[in-house]
Amino acid sequence: MPMKPAFLLVFSLVLLSFSSTLSAAPAPAPTQARHTFGMDDQNFLLDGQPFVIRCGELHFPRIPHEYWRHRLQMCRAMGLNTVCVYIFWNFHEWQEGKYDWSGQADVAEFCRLAQAEGLWVILRPGPYSCAEWEMGGLPWWLLKRDGIRLRTSDPLFLDPATKFLREIARVLAPLQITRGGPLIMVQVENEYGSFGKDAAYMGVLRQTLIDGGFDVPLFACNPAGAIRGGYRDDLFQVVNFGPGAAKKSFETLRKFQKTGPLMNGEYYPAWFDTWGRPHRIGSPEPIVADLDYMLNNHHSFSIYMAHGGTSFGLWAGADRPFLPDTSSYDYDAPISEAGWVTPKFNAIRDVFARHLQPGETIPPPPPANPVITVAPFTLAEAALVLSNLPAPVADLTPRTMESYDQSRGLIVYRTTLPAGPAGTLSVKEAHDFAWIFLDGQPAGLFDRRSKRYGITLPARTKNIQLDILVEAMGRVNFGVEVFDHKGLHAPVLFTPSIPAATPQELTGWFIHSLPMDSAFLASLKFKPVSAKASGPAFWRGAFTVAKPGDTFLDVRSWGKGIVWINGHCLGRFWNIGPTQTMYVPGPWLRAGANEVLVLDLLGPQNPVLAGLATPILDDLRIDRDFARASRAKGGFDAGTLVPVAAGQFRPEPEWQAVRFDHPATGRYLAVEAIDAHDGQPVAAIAELDATDIRGEVLSKSAWKILWTDSEETSTDSGYAENMLDGQPNTQWLSASLPSPSAYPHRVVIDLGLSQTLGGIRYLPRAGDNKKSGRIKNYRVYLNDTPFGLTFAN
């Protein structure tokens, strides 16, 4: 008989009996074992008996340390027997070589608390995570390494990545089930098949974890259409999917995972939110049906997220090409952002109650944490950003933040603009939003979302001071776009508005770094506000409470910025929504006076805050967007242009590559859907990539949707941008309400500059093929002009 793969060996492992103590002290370090865990040809095994993993994801950095035990108790009360935990590399090594495993970063304590509450733990140490987290968990200082290739075997990346994995092993290997702890499985990388195909890279990470002392099963997770990328048969495989895709996804998984139990690695009960888009929710009914299906078939799973929490601080990332994530990570998860029971929680608990193992019970939920309200109060002191600049660094041309050893925050670029005629000020790129000032007066802005990197400046009779204030949002957290340098990307040009004018590069800059750290905030000089303050400013005020409790800070009258309370950074706010409140954990407040600091880059309508008893998560105010994007106008006209590709897609929901007969060059890429496999009028694309002549996927960092004939923006989030976000569970949908328009359906993408392509990659929408909108016949065009479309103002 041939030898079974290593991951199918039954591990003779033992674990200390779980404690049910509610003591606030961490559980003692495990020392002895009494349980076995492993797997055979069909099942996971606990003490030699079939064991179904009912897991849920939650992230300890997104939960106040004081509430860790409460959230774990909520997971257990929902019926979970396991929790899944990401390790965000940048959360523990923000400065190279300086590790932090204390306080909010004490993952070992979190794991011990999980064990004390009767929960097993699945560890996901990266080095890449995604998770709508700054740079997908990768540390910013990697970007200071010229030529680095992230998530590859490049030593510039792999050396620090493996060093970090060895550090994780030092801290957490003692908590494996083999040594009496709760850790039963460890993931290698994260959804690597959606990024690359280097199995040797995956092998190095796997061996690093083994050499560090991990001896529990190691696994890889991917969406169904990406399992092949980087696949190794010495890693156990699990599959990620959302509602309606369980059966098909497990069928795909079984083609790779020939024997052993089947497991879902991420099951999505809803989705995360981005600024300027509606709050996403997921109905309990299909979730309950899928969980029931998996439990009936003894398939294990992990609900992503069981509890989303909050991306406190400046940790929220951005969807690609660039759509910033909200600080609220509520996720419409079964356990709310503030740790509350929801209808989805009760529905899932009821399903689990029907599938308990012999002798197993589900405890009741713990009491909810107290909630308070705070009466409206005014912030009466302000410190103007441009009047509180630190000492500058001189530079010939502006460079990105990382070049000045700045990780995040704000950065001001200052130079002198000589007297002369009106003209256009432009930059190659600005990451992410930039406000332009002439002698302190606002003159316009750059916006990365819409790739607006040019503004018109008036004529000048004398030399004038030019300031460019750049705000860095979270770095993109998915795809090759995680290589996200913040600040200005040179050159900065001024082109006079005269015939045949030559663009002039502006040189001789002074760079002011505003990192938003405690030292910078302490240096601010506040003054009483005697009249309505305008422009970017920090505001300060205070409120009192008799007894601390959770509350939700109402920021509806404010513009765009960041909030701190008693030194704790709550995250970012933006008046466009959908989030209009900020979660304030009770332990961060104190009886008596509490100080509030607000950075507002736009200026408030009214400098008043209040604490509410419930959050506002779905109040979209697009009319307040300072640079609202708009589609090109007119109708699609390919004229006599010959398609660079035409054919028929397969109906299966997996990646499909289209190679052009000959390389083609152009700036505007058009995909024309002629009909659908289901015979219905709705079209859908989950993901669309372009590839170069070698078949390598190209970055989408400069891409934007120029035009589409139809997109669903009412009850179902079907924006065309979804096909560029790298998320298989979102999609472009042609409009179906009030009634669907007929085929053909078309989308035109601006690639940002003329490029030579060798082909495209298409990922169909997952779910039931009967109403999926999966494209059947198609045509692809590439051109240097936008197919007769005219640009909106």
Image (tube, rainbow, N blue to C red):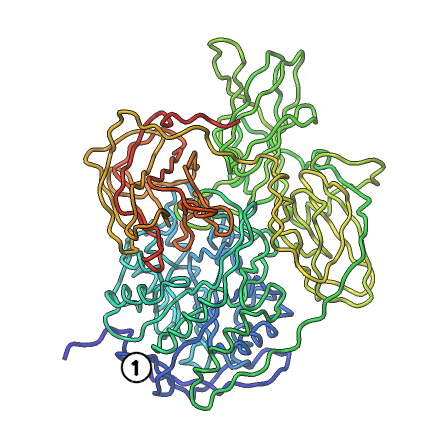
User: How many numbered callouts?
Assistant: 1
Whether residue 91 is situated above or below residue 490 in the rendered picture: below
**Quarter-of-image position of residue 145:** top left
Q: Secondary structure at mark 1?
A: loop
Within-10-Å neighbours for mark 1: few <14, some 14–19, many 20+:
some
Could you say which is closer to the camera, residue 468 or residue 81?
Answer: 81
User: For this view, does 787 lie left or right of residue 584?
Assistant: left
Rendering coords of residue 774 (x, y %):
32, 51
- Type of residue at label 1? Val
Residue positioned 67% across, 28% down in the render: 442
Instruction: Kindly give the residue lying farthest to the left in the view shown.
Output: 1
Whether residue 200 is situated above or below residue 340 in the rendered picture: above
Determine which residue is flagged by label 1.
Answer: 10
Instruction: Kindly give the residue lying farthest to the bottom in the view shown.
Output: 359
Residue positioned 70% across, 26% down in the render: 441
**Which quadrant of the rendered structure holds the N terminus?**
bottom left
Could you say which is closer to the camera, residue 546 or residue 418?
Answer: 546
Rendering coords of residue 184 (x, y %):
41, 76
Rendering coords of residue 210 (x, y %):
34, 69
Rendering coords of residue 402 (x, y %):
51, 41
Instruction: Kindly give the residue lying farthest to the top in the view shown.
Output: 499
User: For this view, does 224 lie left or right of residue 366?
Assistant: left
